[in-house]
């Protein structure tokens, strides 16, 4: 085989290879749409179980299910009219209106000193209710857990619903030497809801 013929075959092979690559990649003027390109954005994958919102923390350790269970256990018409608890701080745990199951608080706010005392005064000012509310609205809104702390590390917890029956109930009193009687259940006032909405 001659050198000229070998060069011709190599040249033809190169032309076929280049044309094959160009055809596989396409050109900017091609009429067919470009192939999908990888992106840095992950595409959502369908999930059969919802992902819990919020994260557990030392300040807001309970799921919305635990909060609702504690709220349902409260006996209406029992408890003291006004709590003698003297808070020095409060942690406000806010749960989304659509929170269910294993969802935790999605917003945590802390107030100390005068702000904590003012919030506690609003809680104490709501009049006790003898019977569990039976007429409730159907709108959704956040649920709050108010964890008041005193100088002796006692913690008095209230659940406040800013929707529906607007229940405001003391669910627990933790700490050594604390009185065992919780404040009586009541309903959230407009002033309390307004105060909770402030950050």
Image: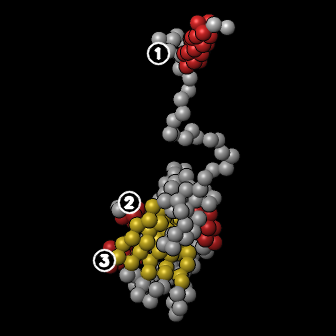
Q: Cβ–Cβ below 8 Å for labels 3 and 1?
A: no
The tag earlier along the polypeptide, 3 or 1, is 1
Residue found 55% across the figure and 56% down from its top: 53
Is residue 106 visible in the rendered image? The answer is yes
Question: Alpha-carbon distance for marks 3 and 1?
Answer: 68 Å
**Crowd around label 3: few <14 · some 14–19 · many ≥20 (10 Å):** few
> Residue 169, relative to residue 135: is it above or below?
below
Distance in Å between CA atoms under marks 2 and 1 = 55 Å
* Residue under label 2: 197
Q: Secondary structure at mark 3?
A: helix
* Quadrant that contains the N terminus: top right
Which residue corresponds to the image point at 32% horizontal and 79% vertical from the top-left?
113
Residue 112, x across and y down, in percent: 35, 76
Reading the chain from its start, which is encountered first: label 2 or label 1? 1
The residue where tag 1 is placed is: 28
Given the current orientation, which residue lies at the most extreme bottom position?
A: 177
């Amino acid at each position: 085989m001659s050198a000229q013929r070998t060069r011709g075959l190599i040249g033809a092979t190169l032309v076929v290879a280049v044309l094959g690559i160009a055809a596989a990649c396409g050109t900017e003027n091609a009429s067919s749409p470009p192939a999908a390109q990888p992106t840095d954005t992950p595409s959502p994958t369908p999930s059969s179980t919802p992902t819990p919102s919020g994260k557990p923390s030392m300040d807001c350790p309970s799921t919305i299910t635990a909060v609702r269970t504690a709220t349902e256990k409260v006996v209406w018409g029992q408890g003291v009219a006004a709590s003698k608890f003297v808070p020095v701080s409060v942690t406000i745990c806010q749960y989304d209106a659509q929170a269910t199951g294993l969802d935790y608080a999605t917003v945590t706010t802390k107030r100390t000193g005068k702000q904590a005392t003012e919030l506690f005064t609003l809680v104490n000012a709501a009049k006790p209710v003898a019977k569990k509310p039976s007429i409730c609205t159907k709108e959704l809104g956040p649920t709050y857990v108010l964890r008041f702390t005193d100088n002796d590390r006692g913690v008095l917890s209230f659940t406040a619903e800013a929707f529906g029956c607007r229940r405001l109930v003391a669910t627990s009193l933790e700490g050594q030497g604390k009185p065992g009687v919780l404040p009586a259940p009541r309903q959230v006032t407009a002033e309390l809801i307004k105060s909770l909405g402030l950050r």
